Amino acid sequence: MWRGNSPGGNPGAATEGTGGELGGQGNWGLEDAPGLLARASLPIVPAWPSPLASSALTVLLGALTSLFLWYCYRLGSQDMQALEAGGRAGGVSGGPRGCSETGRPSPGSSGEPGEGLRTEGLVSRRLRAYARRYSWAGMGRVRRAAQGGPGPGGGPGVLGIQRPGLLFLPDLPSVPFVPRDAQRHDVELLESSFPAILRDFGAVSWDFSGTTPLPRGWSPPLAPGCYQLLLYQAGRCQPSNCRRCPGAYRALRGLRSFMSANTFGNAGFSVLLPGARLEGRCGPTNARVRCHLGLKIPPGCELVVGGEPQCWAEGHCLLVDDSFLHTVAHNGSPEDGPRVVFIVDLWHPNVAGAERQALDFVFAPDP
């Protein structure tokens, strides 16, 4: 058989090259082909044996699973701690508070109408019940609000003048007076109903002297010179008052964003006598906008919200974010008569439909 010659010209000397490596210099023949092919197809040795790789992968998956379970446990533990704290702090009271244009106080509440669920623990529990029944989809802001407590980060709001007493929904535009266009339909409907609502007030009005027994349907004056007749109180219809005020009730039924099934929702007449003043306070949530329809506005009346003064006008609506610090005053003379407005709580225009449904479930009126 033919053999190649080495550089030294020594025939028949078959070498495997320097170091025995493939490609070394020397002679080779056809009978050497199997060995050469075997060396060219040597397998690449893995970084570790395959059983060790499988074991490492199993350990990694186990660690990730344990980390996920630990995270779920921490979330559940935090909710349970908040729930226990809420149970110690008190229960659920659906009653409103104060004379901040509508509402009455209830034990343990610190804000305005509809301040029932006092702790984020109870809010979280009801929110979890809602998610089990429906879904967590679209609940990011509501969940953060339930876990974070009132105010951004649990503290004061914008510049320290927005301090909702119960629920702060993050990432909502915050202005003391909301543009009318934000709730155009409801504003125009209420303003077009102004004659009927004013007529209803005339039918239930009295002299407000305090010397005669309180007429049926009117709330006791919880602040000097402040009276209310509510058609909806903390999300619950007051049937006798609604029957006495058919025009106002018809207007309420036509509104698209009225919080009629939520403890934050109120509607009714608010009367402020000359010399009366409601000092600074904040509402329970920034998820609502309070609509004021002026019915009788004598001189000397003022509304200050978040440091911005405004005044009502008869037959026109003001949209107020009452989670800002606000003050109401009637500085007129006794001859001017009372200031009368019709107030309705509407959803904030930037609260999505899924969030409204969830908050209606969480803050449903007590049966």
Image (tube, rainbow, N blue to C red):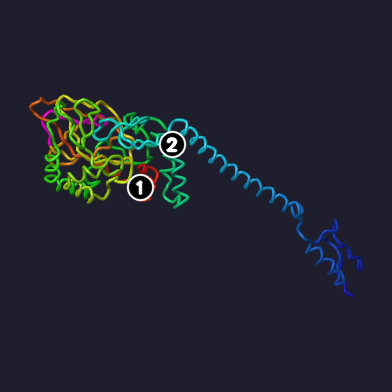
Q: Residue at x 16, y 33 (%)?
A: 311
Looking at the figure, which quarter contains the C terminus?
top left
- Report how many numbered discs are placed on residues in the image: 2
Q: Residue at x 85, y 57 (%)?
A: 18
Frontmost residue, 301 versus 267: 267
Indicate which disc residue 256 carries. Answer: none
Q: Is residue 304 magenta?
A: yes
Of pointers 1 and 2, the one earlier in the residue sequence? 2
Would you say the residues marked 1 and 2 are in contact, meaning their CB atoms lie under 8 Å apart?
no
Left/right placement of residue 103 relative to residue 208 reads right
Q: Residue at x 55, y 38 (%)?
A: 77
Frontmost residue, 97 versus 318: 97
Left/right placement of residue 221 relative to residue 93 reads left
Q: Position of residue 8 (x, y in %)?
A: 88, 62
Q: Position of residue 58 (x, y in %)?
A: 69, 51
- What is the secondary structure assignment of the residue under circle 2? helix
User: For the residue marked with disc 2, what is the amino acid?
Assistant: Glu
Q: Position of residue 132 (x, y in %)?
A: 48, 50
- Of all residues shown, which one is farthest toward the bottom? 1
- Of all residues shown, which one is farthest toward the left? 335
Indicate which disc residue 356 carries. Answer: 1
User: For the residue marked with disc 1, what is the amino acid?
Assistant: Arg
The residue indicated by pointer 2 is 120
Position of 174 relative to 34 (above/below):
above
**Mark 1 vs mark 2, CA separation in Å:** 17 Å
| Among the 4 quarters of the image, the one containing residue 74 | top right
Position of 85 relative to 41 (above/below):
above
Position of 119 relative to 1 (above/below):
above
Q: Is residue 362 magenta?
A: no
Frontmost residue, 89 versus 151: 89
Looking at the figure, which quarter contains the N terminus?
bottom right
Tell me which segment is drawn in magenta. 296-308
